[in-house]
Image: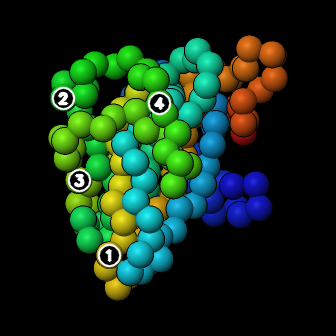
Amino acid sequence: YESNPQVRQFVFGDLMAEICRATIGDDAFLFLDQHVVKAPGGGMKFSWHQDSGYVGFDHAPYLTTWTALDDMDEQIGTVRLLPFSRAGGKAVIKHVREEETNDMVGYSGDDPGMAAIVPAGSIVVFSSLTFHCSGANVSDRWRRSFLAQYTPEPQIRPDGRLAIRAEPFLKAGRRID
């Protein structure tokens, strides 16, 4: 977002403001944004995890928005979500680093979760406590998505340093320009 005005307009726009208000409340900070690309015919899988499992310290749950930039299906390696009712609750589970991929893995059961089969432009919204994964891209198409995460408060490490970023977005429900 820092170098692209269109991305900045998207992550700090009206739609994301509505999504933040409806999920994490009237105060929101941009925590992380990233463009994720999986190449055709082999883009890697991403193991079951909670985004909170990567943080490494106690923190308020936060919001993940996953925007499909291409039509998503199982062949292309779309995101899969495991509802809280099937994951055993909403607690942050201890994650273990997988040697071959460097993924942090928090779930190793056999529930396949629910695949987000969505057209380009769709936004999948979930909590940092939601288990999710994605398959390898075994299609002949590129698989592109854009991830933006928002926190209800700055995420401060135990040593007092800011974790990643806390770009102010909403204060008392109003956008900060």
Which quarter of the figure is the N terminus placed in? Answer: bottom right
Q: Residue at x 40, y 33 (%)?
A: 106
Please tell me which of labels 4 and 2 falls first in the chain. Answer: 2
Q: What distance separates the C-alpha of mark 4 from that of mark 3? A: 22 Å
Please tell me which of labels 1 and 2 falls first in the chain. Answer: 2
Q: Residue at x 40, y 59 (%)?
A: 45
The x, y position of residue 159, in whole percent, is 81, 16
Q: What distance separates the C-alpha of mark 4 from that of mark 2? A: 18 Å
Q: Residue at x 23, y 53 (%)?
A: 115
The x, y position of residue 121, in whole percent, is 38, 63
In this view, the mark in front (4 or 2): 4
Write down the residue under mark 1: 138
Hey, what amino acid is under mark 4?
His
141 left or right, relative to 34? left
- The image's colour scheme reads rainbow
Give residue 115's mark: 3
In this view, the mark in front (4 or 3): 4
Task: Characterize the local packing of mark 4: few (<14), some (14-19) or many (20 or more) Cα atoms within 10 angstroms.
Answer: some
Please tell me which of labels 1 and 3 falls first in the chain. Answer: 3
